[in-house]
Image: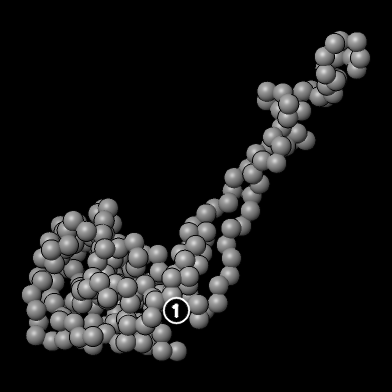
Amino acid sequence: MEVNILDISGKETGAKVQLPESVFAVEPNDHAIYLDVKQYLANQRQGTHKSKQRNEIAGSTRKLHKQKGTGGARAGSIKSPLFNGGGRIFGPQPRDYSFKLNKKLKALARKSALSYKAKENNIVVLSEVNFDSFKTKNYVSLINSLNVANEKTLLVLPAQNNNVYLSSRNLKKAKVTTAAELNTYDVLNASKLLLTADSVKILEEAFAK
């Protein structure tokens, strides 16, 4: 699949790039995508939720009233889960939500997500993206030139670029990442995928291993 390469002003440079079929034209595997997205979201969870059990509640340990003869239920402690302010039964405890996925499955999920974007013609290839300074108006000018200002965009750079990243940080619908850090969730969450010519080469090399 050949795609025209644009400059940051949105004009065609006259050059074209071949999107490798091994990355952008595979048979999508929806279950692999589901597992990879599930793992990504699970890894975002801190898992620090905690509720106190009856042995962790601060309170008196005296017996509330005598065992028999009151006409009410027997009660031994104010910390009982049956009372207001008592411990919680089977409450949440700190845990790790992360789980393991095989590298081949994760690679298949990423290629499947990229193939969906290519099939829907939602990939834009740029010659390069670089700003002299980090200003939000620089990135706004870029997405306006590409006519994607009202869409969620994911810009994939070949390497970390602080000026570009900081310029996009204040924009809700814009996200910048590198080819090495590209994940399935971000690809699917974006309406338009913005790649540079160098990013395409890095992705091809990464998935060829």
Q: What amino acid is at disc 1? A: Leu
Q: Position of residue 6 (x, y in %)?
A: 13, 77
Left or right of 36 on screen, residue 118: left
Residue toward you, 185 or 177: 185
Relative to residue 28, is residue 22 depicted above or below?
below
Q: Which residue is drawn at 52% across and 60% down?
A: 43
Q: Is residue 68 above or below residue 120?
A: above
| Residue 135 placement: quadrant | bottom left
Name the foreground residue: 110 vs 29: 29
Q: Mark 1 points at which residue?
A: 108
Looking at this view, name the residue that lies furthest to the right: 68
Residue at 13% across, 63% down: 147
Counting the numbered discs, the total is 1
Up-down: is 185 above or below 61?
below
Identify the residue at image location x=30%, y=87%: 20
Q: Residue 122's quadrant in the figure?
A: bottom left
Residue 158 coordinates in the image, percent (x, y): 31, 78
Callout 1: SS: helix
Left or right of 30 in this view: 123? left
Local crowd size for mark 1, using a 10 Å CA cut-off: few (<14), some (14–19), many (≥20): many
Viewer-closest of 188 and 194: 188
Quadrant in the picture for the C terminus? bottom left
Q: Is residue 114 among what the camera can see? A: yes
Percent across and percent down for residue 56 are 74, 35
Colour treatment of the image:
one colour
User: From the image, which quarter does the N terminus lie in?
Assistant: bottom left
Instruction: Residue lying at the far top in this picture: please name it.
Output: 70
Q: Write the residue at 18% across / 82% down.
A: 3
Q: Do we see residue 159 in this rendering?
A: no
Query: x, y percentage for residue 90?
Result: 70, 41
